[in-house]
Amino acid sequence: MPGGALAFRDVTCVRGGRTLFAGLSFAVEKGGAALVRGANGAGKSSLIRIAAGLLKPYEGIVAYTPPRALITEDAALDPELPLARALRFWARLDDSERDRDAAVAAALDTFGLAELAEVPVRLLSTGQRRRAGLARVVAADALTWLLDEPANGLDSVSVEALERAIARHRKAGGAVVLATHLPLAVPRAQEILLGAG
Ligand SMILES: Nc1ncnc2c1ncn2[C@@H]1O[C@H](COP(=O)(O)OP(=O)(O)OP(=O)(O)O)[C@@H](O)[C@H]1O
């Protein structure tokens, strides 16, 4: 996909026999952001899952430039490992040991988790675990971040850290697609409204 990060072309999503959205097209450029909005059950999570390749569209095409990183409610971190080691699992395999350590340290720092580096994931609080999930996305160093309700369970300081991390990622040429109920400052984001007709 030259130039772009992610594009939906005439994508239709059907779940449980119900059409959630039909003929949806949009493109997110490098440095761009898309905010997915809609009522409960409108299909926001389904859209994010389609963008991640976890759900096949009923019709249409999804084009993207790899790599993509996904965050859902589930932090996807090994509960038994100390946080820093669990995150290391997601850092880029092609990077050197030192680069991977640096990526994990930076990701921990971004979400105020540096002091918890040696604490096993299972002992983290709900909000800390949510932040750890976001740190995983940062550590993965993917071009496109796919974020499903990333602000859920975050305190206001962490919401600001998330906004800054998104802004920094976009400034570096990354792209973001996010579904959120909660207010999040994402300047110059295109809105994708589901369930509006
Ligand atoms: N595995 C599944 N099989 C059948 N239907 C499903 C499945 N998963 C979700 N659905 C249905 O698809 C619809 C959209 O779900 P989805 O989670 O994408 O909505 P959402 O907009 O993210 O909702 P919310 O705001 O509540 O998180 C819902 O009606 C849901 O019941």
Image: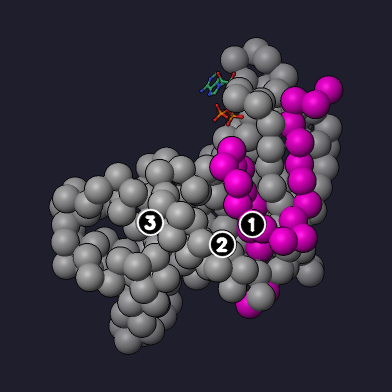
Closer to the N terminus: mark 1 or mark 3? Answer: 3
Residue ID at (67%, 58%): 186
State the residue lying farthest toward the top: 17
Identify the residue under disc 1: 185
Closer to the N terminus: mark 2 or mark 1? Answer: 2
Q: CA distance from mark 3 to mark 2?
A: 12 Å
Does residue 140 appear in the picture of this structure? Answer: no
Identify the residue under disc 2: 163
**Residue type, label 2:** Glu
Secondary structure at numbered mark 2 = helix
Does residue 10 appear in the picture of this structure? Answer: yes
Ligand 1 location (quadrant): top right
Q: Position of residue 88 (x, y in %)?
A: 31, 68
Magenta span includes 113: no
Q: In which quadrant will I find the N terminus? A: bottom right
- Contact check, label 2 and label 1, Cβ < 8 Å: yes
For this rendering, which residue is in front, 33 or 6?
33
Q: Quadrant of residue 87?
A: bottom left
